[in-house]
Image: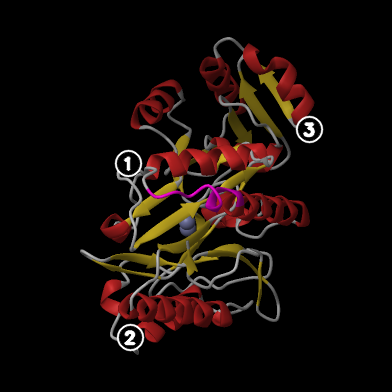
């Protein structure tokens, strides 16, 4: 890996399963990967003996004691500076490495080495995200037809998850959010026993996982005719979302996209109600690098897949958030999400 020099390491121990999947294609739930300048070795246990050999091209080490096998390999290689993923190693594992390795091997914390590679999606990854987005939108359309007053948030979340699987998703990319009425003011509400009632907002935030890749979409519906205040709020959020989408382009700092949404809401004195960032990268994980947040200097690049999702949340009334998955291009961005964005009245 070209970044070894900058990080001053001789090898990298990858423990994040998503990072291992990205680098090797292995989809099992237990493995460690040792990346050296001229070879890469995956360590796993016999449950994955057949699978790992089918999925990866690198060297394979299968052992009923994979931690010990790794330790032995590390000792034999006499690595001077071994990078590890600081955000993905438990303290107990760190202590074990420290104890098992010779004093001449220094453990060097690293951060985001694989994640920064993952930010730019290959053509195959873009296709997987596209498929996840289409399943997402089709499942949303199917679930909306099933909405009835009196059903609970949880009933509707179950319907959405069912439709996603029926349409080919491996499952939801994250816990589906269905929040009705004042509960929609909680940006990460968990669907509960609250029944859907007339004359209130209904916020749905959902994602489908297809071939390991996530999509992410939020839409807000109104049960019955919305009042003027609700329509105004919706219009402001939609304008902010469109302004942020307009700002997305190869070469633009992520913070500029956030600023576009925030200043549009400020024009309607609503910026104080926008309590989270404008978006995030997504791929194998639902939240990935880069963050589209205030002051973020990361430069957007062609091939990044990100969400654009400004929202306003007013206690007592509810929340409105509109979220699409988009692909950064040289001239701007491609909005992948086909679901219409006008306030849906049911
Ligand atoms: Zn979302
Ligand atoms: Zn999101």
Vertical relation: 192 (above or below) 201: above
| Picture layout, residue 337 above or below residue 102 | below
Residue hosting label 2: 266
Of callouts 3 and 2, which one flags the residue occurring earlier in the amino acid sequence? 3
Asked which quadrant contains residue 108, the reply is top left
Nearer to us: label 1 or label 2: 1
Tell me the number on the disc at residue 300.
none
Q: Residue at x 65, y 52 (%)?
A: 138
Find the magenta span and give its range.
142-149
Task: Out of 140 and 45, give the one closest to the viewer.
Answer: 140
Residue at disc 1, secondary structure: loop
Front residue of 61/242: it is 242
Q: What is the distance, in whole Å, between disc 3 and disc 2 at their CAs?
A: 52 Å
Q: Tell me residue 74's x, y (percent).
A: 56, 26
Residue 200 is one of the magenta-drawn residues: no
Q: Which residue sits at x=63%, y=36%?
A: 170
* Residue at figure coordinates x 57%, y 26% from the top left: 29
What residue is shown with label 1? 192
Disc 2 beta carbon < 8 A from ligand 2?
no
The answer to which of marks 1 and 2 sits earlier in the sequence is 1
* Residue 327 makes an appearance in the image: yes
Give left or right: position of 332 versus 199: right
Which mark lies nearer to you, 1 or 3? 1
In this view, which residue lies farthest toward the top?
64
């Amino acid at each position: 890996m070209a970044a070894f020099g900058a990080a001053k390491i001789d090898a990298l121990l990858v423990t994040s399963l998503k990072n291992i999947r990205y680098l090797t294609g292995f989809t099992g739930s237990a493995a460690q990967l040792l990346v050296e300048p001229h070879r890469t070795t995956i360590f796993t246990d016999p449950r994955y003996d057949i699978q790992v050999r089918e999925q990866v091209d690198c060297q394979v080490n299968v052992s009923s004691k994979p931690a010990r096998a790794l330790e032995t390999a590390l000792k034999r290689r006499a690595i001077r500076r071994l990078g590890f993923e600081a955000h993905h190693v438990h303290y107990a594992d760190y202590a074990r490495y420290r104890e098992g390795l010779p004093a001449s091997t220094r453990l060097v914390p690293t951060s985001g080495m694989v994640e920064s590679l993952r930010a730019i999606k290959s053509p195959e990854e873009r296709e997987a995200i596209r498929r996840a987005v289409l399943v997402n939108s089709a499942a949303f359309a199917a679930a909306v037809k099933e909405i009835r007053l009196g059903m609970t948030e949880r009933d509707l979340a179950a319907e959405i998850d069912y439709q996603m699987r029926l349409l080919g998703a491996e499952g939801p990319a994250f816990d589906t959010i269905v929040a009705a009425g004042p509960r929609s003011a909680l940006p990460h509400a968990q669907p509960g026993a609250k029944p859907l009632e007339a004359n209130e907002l209904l916020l749905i935030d959902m994602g489908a996982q297809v071939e390991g890749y996530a999509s992410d979409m939020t839409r807000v519906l109104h049960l019955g005719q919305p009042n003027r205040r609700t329509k105004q709020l919706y219009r402001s959020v939609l304008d902010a979302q469109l302004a942020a989408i307009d700002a997305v382009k190869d070469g633009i700092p992520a913070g500029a996209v956030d600023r576009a949404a925030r200043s549009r809401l400020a024009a309607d004195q609503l910026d104080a109600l926008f309590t989270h960032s404008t978006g995030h990268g997504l791929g194998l994980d639902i939240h990935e690098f880069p963050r589209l947040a205030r002051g973020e200097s990361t430069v957007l690049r062609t091939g990044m897949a990100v969400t654009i999702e400004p929202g306003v949340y007013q206690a007592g009334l509810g929340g409105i958030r509109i979220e699409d998955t988009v692909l950064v291009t040289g001239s701007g961005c491609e909005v992948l999400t086909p679901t219409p964005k006008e306030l849906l009245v049911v």
